[in-house]
Image (cartoon, rainbow, N blue to C red):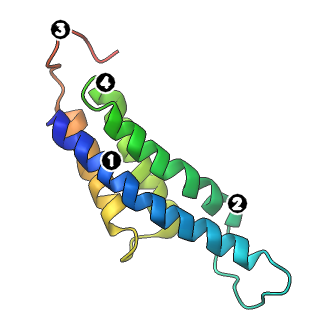
Amino acid sequence: MRSAAGLLGIIGGVIGIFVGLFGYGMVALSNRPEVTGFDLFDNPGFVQLVSLLAPLLLVAGGAMARTRALWAGGALLMGAALFYAAFGFNVATMFPIGFGGVGGLLAIAAGRPDEEKAHF
């Protein structure tokens, strides 16, 4: 389960990087004074922050899923929740949210460590 959580987190994070680049670019475009009619976001600062943090959490959670499954599960679920909060569930975010959510659940479900090491 830890390997599946890691793979899902990394794939979701790589896809999320493209969503984040697009979201950050749309906010930057809407902030330009010569461009009008692009008031797409209620909170553009939050969207720019999530465009950076959510893919980072997904990739980092996927990378640490083998050694620290509980922390990885929290990071994966937090990254998926941030994507949902900033962009909603749509065709661009369904894979980062889905892969991060399922990966987070799998990492948390791997409660008994494979090694003789506790979660904390």
- Say whether disc 2 or disc 3 marks the residue closer to the N-terminus: 2
Q: Amino acid at mark 3?
A: Glu
Residue at far top of view: 116
| Residue for badge 3 | 116
Residue at far bottom of view: 37
Q: Amino acid at mark 1?
A: Ile
Q: Secondary structure at mark 3?
A: loop
| Residue for badge 4 | 68
Identity of the residue drawn at 34% across and 35% down:
63
Q: Are marks 1 and 3 in contact (CB under 8 Å)?
A: no
Quote the CA–CA distance across marks 2 and 4.
Answer: 31 Å
Compare residues 70 and 34 and report the one nearer the observer: 34
The local crowd at label 1, few if under 14, some if 14 to 19, many if 20 or more residues have their Cα within 10 Å, is many
Quote the CA–CA distance across marks 3 and 4.
Answer: 12 Å
Quote the CA–CA distance across marks 2 and 3.
Answer: 43 Å
Q: Are marks 3 and 4 in contact (CB under 8 Å)?
A: no
- Rendered image: mark on residue 45: 2
Q: Secondary structure at mark 4?
A: loop
Number of marks in the rendered image: 4
| Residue for badge 1 | 10
Quote the CA–CA distance across marks 4 and 1.
Answer: 15 Å
Q: In the displayed structure, does residue 43 sit left or right of residue 106?
A: right
Identity of the residue drawn at 49% across and 51% down:
54
Identity of the residue drawn at 63% across and 54% down:
49
Q: In the displayed structure, does residue 32 sit left or right of residue 103?
A: right
